[in-house]
């Protein structure tokens, strides 16, 4: 999901409001954002004000509308279904495209194909699904891998009813097909006056439902639709827009919806949001529930971590001008906090699909302060998304050198070691991550 906003319209609109209306709009924008878990600092206060202003204008057109104190008007709007829906449709502008970030889709397809060797059918959740681009991409990749309609079922949800109505049509814009090659386009899509219509075979495997993931009854509804827990959940570029309480609530819901060995796919800058003590990487932007090991002694783990890190520390860090600083890796040190504005800029670029721009922003900030471990970790994940695994590993090594108890980086290094067949290094990293969890 990509969310865009028109802040200039919001500023012009707010100037035209009376004092009472202005207060009503602010109260309603805050109340609605809280209700759906949106972080106004990330979504944009101006965007929320614009959405609330549109809802107020619509509310005033209703026959039963009566002027009153701003608090009372806000309460009336909160109780009005049309006002709530109008706010949501105005603030959430869903945009995506088919086969977004190919390395991620390759892993998704490989994971599902592997599961279908062991079971007759898989269930997949795509939420938020925008106009159906992600769900459609998964269906097409499975068909291309030789699987039939009876072997998988996709449930796709979005809080936007407009997005769901568009998804049910199965018609995509030229922009949504910008990464679809000519062969795939000719095989699965037909040109229409409205856009490119996907083959009915793909649409028939997807159940599109308008639903708020944070609603109390959402897990029950989804489990009923899928007939049980999901093998794979794609929840990309939603966590970054939520408040911390809403993030925690959503992650718990996703956990309840996922099979014990199921996998969760998140957006390009969202791995840092997932609690590393609970989730471990399985591929590009893909995670499963953490497999805990018996916790060994701290001394042995720190020795193993030191040996693993120092063996790599001589390498110059790719994408950075200087090698890893000479700091004591086994002591608790003050970790530099990444400036909020940098985080938001990186998130905005990644959410818009411009991973290269997000990488450049990270590198620019790291040139000023190369010890920002969370930014090093984010940069490593971005490189993984692009398929640059060697660069990613070097960045992860530096992150762990600077912060030996960085669980996310340790678990990513464990996965890389596993993929390389280095079981000894994998176990060291996993055990170090396990200890880090006991200290966090």
Image (cartoon, rainbow, N blue to C red):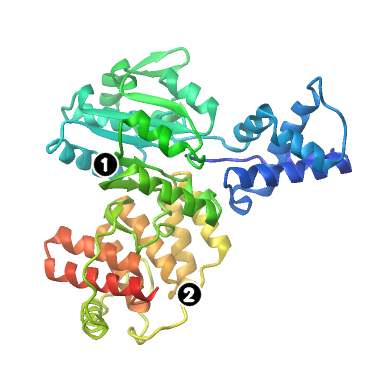
Q: Quadrant of residue 70?
A: top right
Mark 1, secondary structure of its residue: helix
Secondary structure found at label 2: loop
Q: Is residue 190 visible?
A: yes
For the residues labelled 2 and 1, the Cα–Cα distance comes to 35 Å
- Position of residue 189 relative to residue 264, above or below, is above
Question: Which x, y percent locates residue 270?
Answer: 42, 54
Q: Residue at x 48, y 37 (%)?
A: 217
Whether 223 is drawn above or below 188: the answer is: below
Choose between 98 and 88: the one closer to the eye. Answer: 88
As rendered, which of 426 and 276 lies closer to the eye?
A: 276
Q: Could you tell me which residue is drawn at 52 percent across and 39 percent down?
A: 215
Please give the residue where the numbered disc 2 appears in the rendered image.
Answer: 369
Q: Position of residue 353 (x, y in %)?
A: 44, 44
Compare marks 2 and 1 and give the one earlier in the sequence.
1
Residue 353 appears left or right of 112: right
Q: Residue 288 vs residue 78: left or right?
A: left
Tally of marks: 2
Expressed as whole percent of the image width and height from the top left, the position of residue 59 reads 76, 28
Which of the pair 70/336 is nearer the observer?
Answer: 70
- Taking 247 as reference, is 66 above or below it? above
Query: Where residue 199 appears, x then y in whole percent?
Result: 31, 17
Q: Residues within 10 Å of mark 2 (few under 14, many from 20)?
A: few
Label 2 close to label 1 by CB (< 8 Å): no
Asked whether residue 97 is in view, the answer is: no
* View extreme (top): residue: 193
Quadrant housing residue 98: top left
Q: Which mark is residue 108?
A: 1
- Residue at 26 percent across and 58 percent down: it is 389
């Amino acid at each position: 999901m990509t969310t865009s906003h028109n802040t200039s319209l919001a500023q012009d609109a707010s100037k035209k409001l009376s004092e009472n209306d202005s207060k009503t709009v602010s109260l309603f924008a805050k109340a609605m954002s809280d209700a759906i878990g949106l972080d106004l600092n990330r979504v944009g206060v101006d965007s929320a004000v614009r959405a609330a202003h549109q809802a107020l204008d619509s509310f005033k057109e209703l026959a039963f509308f009566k002027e009153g104190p701003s608090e009372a008007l806000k309460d009336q709007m909160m109780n009005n279904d049309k006002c709530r829906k109008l706010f949501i449709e105005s603030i959430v502008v869903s945009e995506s495209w088919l086969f977004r970030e190919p390395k991620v889709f390759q892993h998704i397809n490989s994971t599902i194909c592997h599961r279908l060797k062991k079971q007759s059918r898989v269930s997949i959740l795509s939420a938020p699904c925008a106009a159906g681009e992600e769900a459609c991409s998964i269906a097409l990749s499975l068909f291309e891998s030789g699987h039939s309609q009876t072997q998988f079922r996709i449930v796709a949800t979005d809080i936007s009813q407009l997005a769901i109505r568009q998804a049910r049509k199965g018609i995509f814009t030229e922009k949504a097909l910008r990464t679809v090659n000519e062969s795939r386009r000719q095989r699965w899509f037909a040109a229409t006056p409205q856009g490119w219509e996907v083959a009915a075979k793909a649409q028939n495997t997807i159940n599109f439902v308008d639903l708020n993931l944070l609603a109390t009854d959402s897990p029950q509804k989804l489990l009923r639709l899928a007939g049980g827990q999901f093998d794979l959940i794609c929840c990309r570029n939603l966590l970054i827009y939520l408040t911390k309480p809403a993030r925690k609530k959503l992650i718990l819901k996703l956990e309840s919806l996922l099979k014990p060995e199921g996998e969760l796919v998140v957006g390009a800058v969202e791995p840092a949001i997932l609690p590393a003590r609970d989730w471990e990487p399985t591929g590009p932007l893909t995670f499963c529930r953490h497999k805990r090991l018996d916790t060994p002694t701290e001394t042995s783990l720190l020795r193993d971590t030191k040996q693993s890190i120092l063996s790599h520390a001589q390498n110059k860090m790719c994408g950075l001008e200087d090698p890893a600083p000479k700091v004591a890796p086994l002591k608790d040190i003050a970790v530099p906090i990444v400036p909020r504005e940098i985080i938001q800029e990186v998130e905005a670029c990644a959410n818009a699909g411009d991973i290269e721009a997000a990488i450049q922003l990270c590198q620019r900030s790291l040139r000023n302060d190369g010890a920002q471990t969370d930014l090093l970790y984010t940069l490593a994940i971005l490189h993984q998304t692009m398929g640059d695994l060697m660069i990613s590993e070097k960045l992860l090594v530096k992150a762990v050198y600077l912060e030996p108890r960085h669980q996310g980086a340790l678990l990513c290094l464990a996965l890389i070691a596993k993929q390389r067949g280095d079981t000894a290094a994998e176990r060291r990293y996993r055990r170090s991550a396990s200890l880090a969890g006991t200290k966090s």
